[in-house]
Image (tube, rainbow, N blue to C red):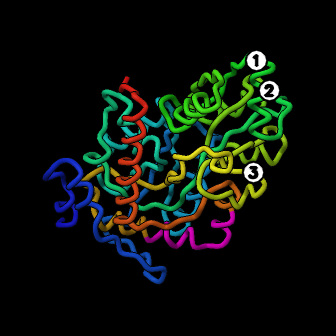
Amino acid sequence: MSAQHDYKLAATGRRVFIKQSIGLASGLGVALTLPQAFAEQRLRIIVGFPPGGGTDAVARLIGDRLRERLGYPVVVENKPGAGGQLAAQALKAAAPDGNTLFLSHDHSISILPMLVKNPGFDPFKDFVPVVGFASFVNAFGVSAAVPVKTFPEYLDWVKKTGGGKSTVGIPAPASTPEFLVKVLADRYKVDLQSAAYRGSAPMMADMVGNQIPAGVGSVQDLIEYHKAGKVRILAVLGKNRQVALPNVPTFAEYGLDGFEDMPYYGLFAPAGTPQAAIDQIGRAVQQAIAEPKLAAQMTDIGLVVQFMNQAQFSNRVQSYTQAWAKIISASGFKPQ
């Protein structure tokens, strides 16, 4: 079939990534009629983090709506480990038949491949972006047992009770949260040590259980615990305060710049996936996030709903990757 032939890897590198990203049909009024080749499908959405975490929650919200829109089963499959690396490798190994997608944020696609010597995949050769549907920011929170209500109070607490030393949980090693911890430690002259977890769910369990005093993760990782009074979010990244957290200041308000670019959420498919299947998913996602109910659910967990068609999402991934390449290079970090 010609659509599949056009998207087989005939070249390498970013040119292939851009070529594969052209031509996503859009428009809320387009009917979702599956081509005959895809009439009998079962869509698998791979997630690189454990059940119960923020990314898992996002995947299940999107998966439920895709099932309704596409008319066939959609299954979320968790493959936690190595900050999404195992899930990305699983996507690379999957058949490019339109039946397997990887729901990921920036870390696994834009950052991890620059931090690991042999990640086992190249997102610009092995994957094709399908559609982007949201942006988000990371947040700094503390356990309810820590007697502080603001980030300056937290710094004073670390200096007075910990002798200037403390531990901060992060959902994955060599991630945006880990870089933030390093920046905060350098900026405010405190010894903050990152404690890496296998996803946000176990990190949040330890924060709620007062086993670790602080943590950095996406807003969607922390927000429900914040609302329940089990943790307190002290500050968020990004240019603006979050709609779901209007009383929480940004780090920019505290004078910390350089983290204004918001991470993304989106879906990726194996390289060579037929364009007809990619278009089908893109239209379904566009219609789904336009529903007021789903948009409200996504906003409530700290996401900024943002539809990005295939070409727009491809550009977003590349620009974000380039921005973090500069940050990582300036930090002196060496791939492990």
The circle drawn on residue 248 is 3
Q: Residue at coordinates 62% horizontally, 36% vertically from top-left?
A: 200
Q: What segment carries the magenta color? A: 283-296
Q: Quadrant of residue 210?
A: top right
Whether residue 214 sits left or right of residue 328 in the image: it is: right
Q: Residue at coordinates 84% horizontally, 29% vertically from top-left?
A: 145
Q: Which residue is label 2 attached to?
A: 157
Number of marks in the image? Answer: 3
Percent from the top left, x then y, of residue 28? Answer: 48, 80
Height in image: 276 above or below 317?
Answer: below
Q: Quadrant of residue 207?
A: top right
> Upstream in the sequence, badge 1 or badge 3?
1
> Please, which residue is most extreme toward the left here?
10
Element marked by disc 3: loop
Height in image: 41 above or below 94?
Answer: below
Q: Amino acid at mark 3?
A: Val
Element marked by disc 2: helix
Categorize mark 1 by other alpha carbons within 10 Å: few (<14), some (14-19), many (20+): few
> Upstream in the sequence, badge 3 or badge 2?
2
Percent from the top left, x then y, of residue 133? Answer: 51, 62
The circle drawn on residue 162 is 1
Closer to us: 241 or 231: 241
Categorize mark 2 by other alpha carbons within 10 Å: few (<14), some (14-19), many (20+): some
- Contact flag, marks 2 and 1 (Cβ < 8 Å): yes
Q: Amino acid at mark 1?
A: Gly
- The label nearer to you, 3 versus 2, is 2
